[in-house]
Image (cartoon, helix red, strand yellow):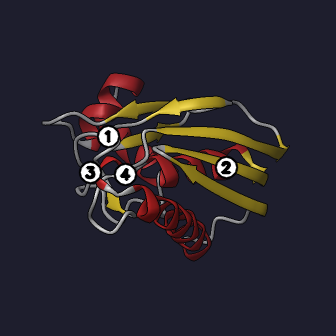
Amino acid sequence: MGLFTFIKDVGAKIFGGKTSSELKAEEKLNAETQAAKKLTDTINQLGLKITDLNIVVLDDTATVKGVAPDQSTKEKVILVIGNSAGIATVDDQMTVEEPQPEAQFYTVVSGDSLSKIAKKYYGDAMKYPEIFEANKPMLKSPDLIYPGQVLRIPAQE
């Protein structure tokens, strides 16, 4: 899929509460290595199965390689990585065993709700559970989204 752009200083704190630009040079490499490990651990804890998963963080870019069983899993991995503070770009170098149509990505803005997003993309606010399901397990509740977060919006079948 290529490069995806995210808001660097929004999301889970994987750099120990600091942004990558605040770290000293000698601390930076260690922080990037730890960030890659934490991202890998998070992906595994979420049950997102990627064969040969390899994440490298350099500056504010995370490069991810591996084989996803399907497009949905691949996109969820991209979102887990990109929705982490300190990551501005995800270089997706993953492949997919069973190719499927790609979902759209949407960046949440202040005042958004899943029902408002569903109305925009599907014409029906009551289809918000489809967006919620498409973003599990990263989303724990339909009410817990935040500005700057990027969500998967699956195509309507």
Q: Nearer the viewer, residue 83 or 47?
A: 83
Q: Looking at the image, which residue is at 28% across and 36% down?
A: 108
Q: Amino acid at mark 1?
A: Met
Q: State how far apart marks 2 and 1 are (Cα).
A: 34 Å
Q: Amino acid at mark 3?
A: Ile
Which circle marks residue 67 in the picture? none
Residue 81 position, x and y percent, is 51, 52
Q: Nearer the viewer, mark 1 or mark 3?
A: 3
**Number of residues whose C-alpha sits closer than 10 Å to that of mark 1, classed few (under 14), some (14–19) or many (20 or more):** few
Question: What is the secondary structure assignment of the residue under circle 4?
Answer: helix
- Which quarter of the figure is the C terminus placed in? top right
Q: Looking at the image, which residue is at 66% across and 53% down?
A: 73
> Reading the chain from its start, which is encountered first: label 1 or label 3?
1
Which circle marks residue 20 in the picture? 4
Q: Looking at the image, which residue is at 30% across and 28% down?
A: 119
**Number of residues whose C-alpha sits closer than 10 Å to that of mark 3, classed few (under 14), some (14–19) or many (20 or more):** some
Q: Nearer the viewer, mark 4 or mark 1?
A: 4
Q: Looking at the image, which residue is at 42% across and 39% down?
A: 88
Label 3: which residue?
A: 145
Asked whether residue 157 is in view, the answer is no
Furthest toward the left, the residue is: 111
Residue 14 position, x and y percent, is 40, 64
> Reading the chain from its start, which is encountered first: label 2 or label 1?
2
> Reading the chain from its start, which is encountered first: label 2 or label 4?
4
Q: State how far apart marks 2 and 4 are (Cα).
A: 18 Å
Residue 41, placed above or below residue 98: below
Q: State how far apart marks 1 and 3 are (Cα).
A: 17 Å
> Reading the chain from its start, which is encountered first: label 3 or label 2?
2
Label 1: which residue?
A: 126
* Image quadrant in which you'd find residue 71: top right
Residue 7 position, x and y percent, is 34, 38
Label 2: which residue?
A: 64
